[in-house]
């Protein structure tokens, strides 16, 4: 009796439905997990929102677009962190759709679905996505840029050039990785016959002009402030430490390969020798892929990870330029293009279960980790009691000063968490360092008053040196203790803190915020 797995049957009969079902399932899982189980936003998201709240054209954290969008999403959700979580998953959905649309144009709809199903096995498209920031936003902007670049260059659609220019400009307004992608696109255009032919029309130059125009305000801000793009912050290595930098390059490439563990497992299962059976494995043929299309996919699948990791290694950065997500958006499509015009899915039933496993296991493992990590002494950021912290410091400031909390200073993450959950939505003086928070300084904090928080490093709760330098008259309060949702074997969370009372006007009212 012939048995066909549900995924194979859907791939044959309803490939578009299979694509949307798989994509929306993954997005729904990674929206539900942080929204339901995280007590505090993960990673750098609180800092992203603190920076976005200031609406700066640029900061030491980079170009502004991701920070602005995080703030918009937060406000659109009624001041809820669910807004940025949803924005992250929209980015993932758009990334998958753009790769699917590009694959549909090059390898057909069935093989395009296979490419996107393989993307589900790449951890970079799932586990880190609730932590919205420039690296997450770079994924859909890269995928859209490549999609429209292909439609303009490979299919001759002049309107696609305009869309590609807009997407590339937004990418430049998000991360310095946009410069790498723009350079690669320029080289590819000049190096191919079809690219040189396209340059005889005005559309590539129009796309470039649009990208430059969109990114120009940020470029002018960089020039005015004398700041440098993150890609150029570190000096190139001398010959003495070149070997160490190359070793770091290999380490970065290894990290990218490790992030494909689910991807590799799916490929090995699909390509494995089946057990002896009279039933043939399902095969999915396609029209032959043209050489130019194959070259396009392979170049933009292989060159970005090599360039981004090499640039990071040479400049001493701990991760690929622009983050890891944008460099692997075409990994699945590249494999589908490379394996040939007929794809045979061996062990189809096991393959279906394996795909469900690589999609379901990361969120389930995250939930399990949140519940068990405290019992083995691991303090996860997502377990921090952000709401209780914000409530205590906000109410204390209200009670003592009879005025709203306008500023939180100190440790970047802790101060950002308090500001995020406080109903007053105060400004954040990150690490009490004017270089990291150019929108505010110690004098303004002293004028408007605020709370200063820091992690406990000694039994007395002594303020760190940077805080003492900026606020020499600050008196440390008795450290405050907060209960986590699950304490396990961890001690209660103790924070050092102090309060700065607002300066008074002649009439006795606090100084107004600037």
Image (cartoon, rainbow, N blue to C red):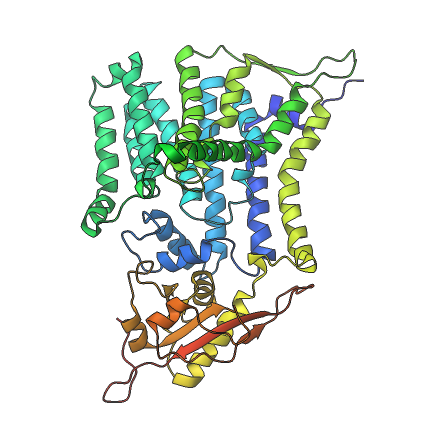
Left or right of 164 in this view: 266: right
Say whether residue 426 is visible: no
Q: Which residue does the image show at 57% across and 29% down from the upper left?
A: 118
Classify the position of the N terminus by image quarter.
top right
Report the number of numbered marks: 0
Task: Place residue 388 in its image quadrant.
Answer: bottom right
Which residue reaches farthest right?
1
Residue 248, percent from left and from top: 46, 35
Residue 434, percent from left and from top: 30, 62
Classify the position of the C terminus by image quarter.
bottom left
Left or right of 360 in this view: 432: left
Which residue reaches farthest front?
240
Left or right of 429 in this view: 122: right
Task: Place residue 383 in its image quadrant.
Answer: bottom right
Residue 398, percent from left and from top: 42, 81
As rendered, which of 89 and 429 lies closer to the eye?
429
Residue 480's place in the image compared with 36, above or below, is: below
Say whether residue 18 is visible: yes
Which residue reaches farthest bottom?
507
Task: Place residue 54 in its image quadrant.
Answer: bottom left
As rendered, which of 149 and 370 lies closer to the eye?
370
Residue 221, percent from left and from top: 22, 49
Left or right of 188 in this view: 480: right
Residue 488's place in the image compared with 161, above or below, is: below
As rendered, which of 188 and 168 lies closer to the eye?
188
Q: Which residue does the image show at 54% across and 21% down from the upper left?
A: 111
Residue 376's place in the image compared with 209, above or below, is: below
Residue 120's place in the image compared with 348, above or below, is: below
């Amino acid at each position: 009796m012939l048995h066909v797995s549900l995924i194979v049957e859907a791939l044959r009969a309803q490939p578009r439905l299979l694509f949307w079902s798989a994509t929306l399932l993954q997005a729904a899982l990674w929206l539900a997990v942080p929204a339901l189980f995280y007590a505090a936003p993960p990673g750098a998201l609180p800092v992203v929102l603190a920076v976005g709240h200031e609406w700066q054209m640029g900061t030491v954290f980079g170009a502004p677009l991701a920070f602005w969008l995080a703030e918009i999403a937060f406000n659109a959700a009624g001041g809820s962190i669910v807004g940025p979580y949803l924005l992250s998953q929209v980015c993932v959905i758009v990334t998958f759709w753009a790769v699917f649309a590009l694959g549909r144009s090059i390898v057909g709809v069935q093989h395009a679905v296979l490419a996107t199903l393989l993307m589900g096995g790449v951890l970079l498209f799932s586990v880190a996505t609730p932590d919205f920031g420039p690296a997450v936003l770079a994924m859909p902007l890269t995928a859209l840029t490549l999609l429209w670049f292909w439609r303009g260059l490979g299919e001759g659609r002049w309107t696609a050039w305009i869309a590609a220019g807009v997407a590339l400009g937004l990418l430049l307004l998000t991360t310095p990785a946009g410069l790498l992608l723009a350079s690669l696109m320029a080289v590819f255009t000049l190096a191919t016959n079809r690219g040189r032919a396209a340059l005889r029309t005005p559309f590539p130059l129009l796309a470039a002009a649009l990208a430059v125009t969109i990114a120009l305000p940020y470029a002018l801000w960089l020039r005015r402030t004398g700041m440098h793009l993150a890609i150029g912050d570190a000096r190139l290595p001398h010959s003495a430490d070149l070997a160490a930098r190359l070793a770091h390059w290999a380490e970065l490439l290894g990290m990218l390969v490790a992030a494909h563990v689910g991807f590799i497992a799916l490929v090995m299962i699909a390509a494995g020798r089946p057990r002896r059976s009279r039933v043939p494995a399902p095969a999915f043929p396609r029209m032959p892929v043209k050489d130019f299309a194959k070259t396009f996919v392979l170049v933009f699948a292989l060159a970005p990870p090599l360039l981004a990791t090499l640039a990071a290694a040479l400049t001493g950065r701990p991760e690929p330029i622009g983050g890891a997500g944008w460099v692997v958006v075409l990994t699945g499509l590249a494999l589908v293009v490379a394996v040939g015009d007929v794809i045979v899915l061996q062990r189809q039933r096991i393959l279906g279960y394996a795909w469900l496993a690589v999609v379901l296991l990361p969120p389930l493992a995250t939930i399990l980790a949140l519940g068990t990590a405290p019992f083995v002494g691991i303090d996860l950021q997502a377990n921090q009691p952000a709401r209780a912290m914000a409530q205590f410091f906000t109410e204390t400031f209200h009670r003592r000063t009879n005025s709203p909390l306008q500023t939180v200073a100190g440790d970047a993450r802790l101060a950002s968490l308090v500001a995020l959950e406080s109903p007053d939505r105060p400004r954040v003086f990150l690490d009490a360092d004017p270089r990291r928070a150019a929108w505010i300084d110690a004098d303004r904090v002293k004028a408007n008053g605020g709370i200063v928080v820091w992690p406990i490093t000694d039994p007395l709760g002594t303020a760190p040196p940077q805080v003492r330098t900026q606020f020499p008259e600050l008196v440390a309060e008795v450290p405050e203790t907060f209960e986590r949702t699950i304490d396990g074997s961890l001690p209660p969370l103790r924070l050092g803190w102090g309060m700065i009372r607002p300066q008074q006007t002649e009439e006795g009212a606090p100084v107004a915020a600037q």
